[in-house]
Image (spheres, rainbow, N blue to C red):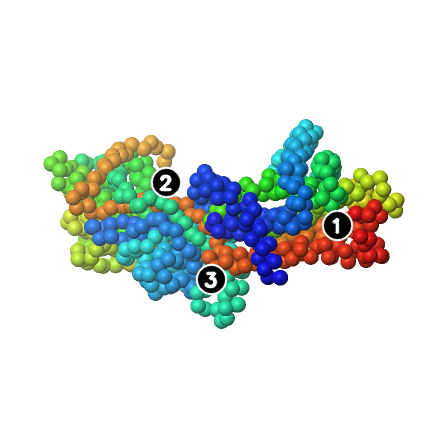
Amino acid sequence: MWIDEADGFAEIFKGYLPYYLLVALPIFIIMSPVNPVAASHEFSVYRMQHYDLHTVPHGCRSASFNLEGRSLTSWSTSRHCVVARVQDITIDQFMEIRSKAGALLLVLPKNDTVLTVEEKEHIQLLEMAMIQQEVNAPVYFARWTPEFEDILRDLQHSFITDDKSGTALEAMLNTVSSNGYQIVVSASTPQKLDSKPVTLHGKLVGRSGSAQTIVIAAHYDSSAIVPELSQGADSNASGAVAVLELARIFSRLYSTASVRGAPSLLFVLTSLGHSLNYFSAKKWLEEQLDSTDASLLQDVSFVMCLDSLSSSDSMTMHVSKPPKPGGAAHSLKSRLGVNINHKKINLADELLAWQHERFSIRRMTAFTLSSLQSHKDPSRSTVLDLPSEAGIRNLAANIAATARALASHVYNLTDELNDEDRALYDDALVSTSVHAVDKREPEYALYGATRAALYVYSVKPAVFDLILTLAIVAYLTVVYFAIQLFPRFYEEYAKIVTGKSKVH
Amino acid sequence: MTLYHFGNCLALVYAPYHMAYKFSGISEYATFSKCVYAGGLYIFTQLCKMLLLATFFPDSDSNHITGEYNVFLEILKATVDFADLLGIYFALNSVPGKGHAKILTSAIGWASAEVVVTRSVMLWVGARGSEFSWRYVRACAESNVALLHTAASAALVWLSTRSDLPRRHAPLVLALLALSPYRGLLEDAAAALLALSPWALLALRALHAAALGLTSLALYAVLAQQIGI
């Protein structure tokens, strides 16, 4: 019986099966492309911030990986890519992943409005923790999609275990039923971006040429853990908008000789915000102050920096030196009616706290107006910094308050000024200056690429193929015996159908 | 998934056909060339069907876009599959020998050609890629069912050409033959109505093919008894 069967199987291989396959298969393999099938899932993902500040590396250092996806609980080695929701991962878990895992893929929340205050705070703290140090594994962020939800659920509930199942049978069933995911990002190694920060400034010349200058400044770059997704609605689009709006209001006032104020107004928009140490403000100041024909910043009355004005409708004045009573800054402070937050400049810190410190270092009276109480507020650099209706209302209120205070200071009024807009033309002269980064010792360096395509392949472990082979062999054995027994079956069947035995 | 997985799928497709050819006794008739001839007839039939469909039927892709499912049009299209029965008839005629050898040779040749034409590219492209899907394993199992189905159809065609077919069987044979082009449609309709999973649909197809096979085998047995083969 067994020998017969062995003969039967040997027959199969003795036939024409192996010979033509031996020739045909290699030809096919050579001819066909390496990876002929497209992945079932393809996503756009955004790489974590990657930059050097004073040659100290920050953020994610690598870009491409090809690893097996695992959930937060089931990953174990550097051959795994951890896939998790941003709100699920704790800072401790991140620290462990940073040192041991192969890659990290974080899925952003579906919609930021459903997040509780605690969750938002958690995400902001996580962002801060992540950007503090360098991460050697690739870290990517992805927007929420239903497909990602499925993948996350699969990874959480069915993990292809190495040792966690009870019995061998259980492990085997797990292998067959579970879905594995191979996650692939093919990107080139991060390249240093050629960054040329641009500073814009425009001046409204006052009534008397010799009078003092008031500088109104803001930076216009946002910063967050994901450069592609950092909108920076509050920090610092609101500040930049405030500068532009003040420029619009005062350019109308200054365009008529009779209502022109005494001091000149200088509006400055710099790039590179707090995360890159206000480097372009520093460069711009050097250019303006240290060049021989420096006339722009002579006799500065005070510098007013605007930062993050939309988170509430009250403002705080941040100073590095308390304003002297009777000084211009103090006058504005009393006209604004805001609280003062005094923080000395600490040059030993890696980062300056506020933009005004750049001006204070150059011995100008400077302060920052912000809705935030502290420069350490994590909401200054988060991907959750998105435009909102309430934010726009706060911003409008703050701009109105600032404009009123500034106008009353400029015209030296004691009572409330009612500055009705008049239809006038804009004559502010705007100049731009482009700064270059020091080649030998760069103050900062930014790296691309900031986005990539992510492919997710559903895969089964290698053991699965072996189990499938066993199942196919079992099936083929059944088919073999069915064919072998067919004549006998036919005889019996014919007997039943026709009612008599076959005549031979 | 891998080349190994492709090998698995190939074994699942190929081995039953090979065993059917080797162990059913028709290989003793040295009819490999006849199998190839039946396969050639299959391809020729498909070309004729495609010509018919392309000439007389509206572009089906535009229907896919609008998402409409025109039942009447689908039935008309399935009607073109009567050409398959004609093709099998010619294949049967070209094979010399006894009834069962005729039926098996043309069925195996016909079904093999079908597998090669419809499944090989899909398997090569799909099962070898890094993406795993049960779809390919299912397609392989389905091709086994197709062999059974083709054999049953060939048996019915052969029975209907016999002039000595018992009178009382003729209506049944003709009815089954008339239904055969619409089998795929009926199976799909049943699956859609019962909301069957793909595996359940495969089981349904297998059951259907088995029932059809047993019925035609019974009819064949009666006739074989009568004429003494």
Circle on res. A420: 2
Residue at the disc numbered 3: A160
- The amino acid beneath tag 3 is Ile
| Snapshot quadrant of residue A493 | bottom right
Residue at the disc numbered 1: B212
- The amino acid beneath tag 2 is Glu
Q: Nearer the viewer, mark 3 or mark 1?
A: 1
Q: Is residue A183 visible?
A: yes
For this orientation, the residue located farthest to the top is: B55
For this orientation, the residue located farthest to the bottom is: A166
| Residue under the image location 43 percent in, 61 percent down | A71
Specify which label sits upstream in the sequence, 2 or 3: 3
Same chain check for tags 2 and 3: yes
Would you call the spot at circle 2 few (<14 residues within 10 Å), some (14-19), or many (20 or more)? few
Image position, residue B175 (x, y; %): 81, 44
Nearer the observer, A488 or A136 = A488
| Residue under the image location 52 percent in, 42 percent down | A20
Q: Is residue A152 visible?
A: no
Image position, residue A451 (x, y; %): 37, 45
Image position, residue B186 (x, y; %): 73, 47
Nearer the observer, A56 or A269 = A56
Helix, strand or loop under label 2: loop
Q: Does A197 sit left or right of B162 as displayed?
A: left
Q: Nearer the viewer, mark 1 or mark 2?
A: 1
Mark 2 to mark 3 CA distance (whole Å): 70 Å
| Residue under the image location 45 percent in, 64 percent down | A161
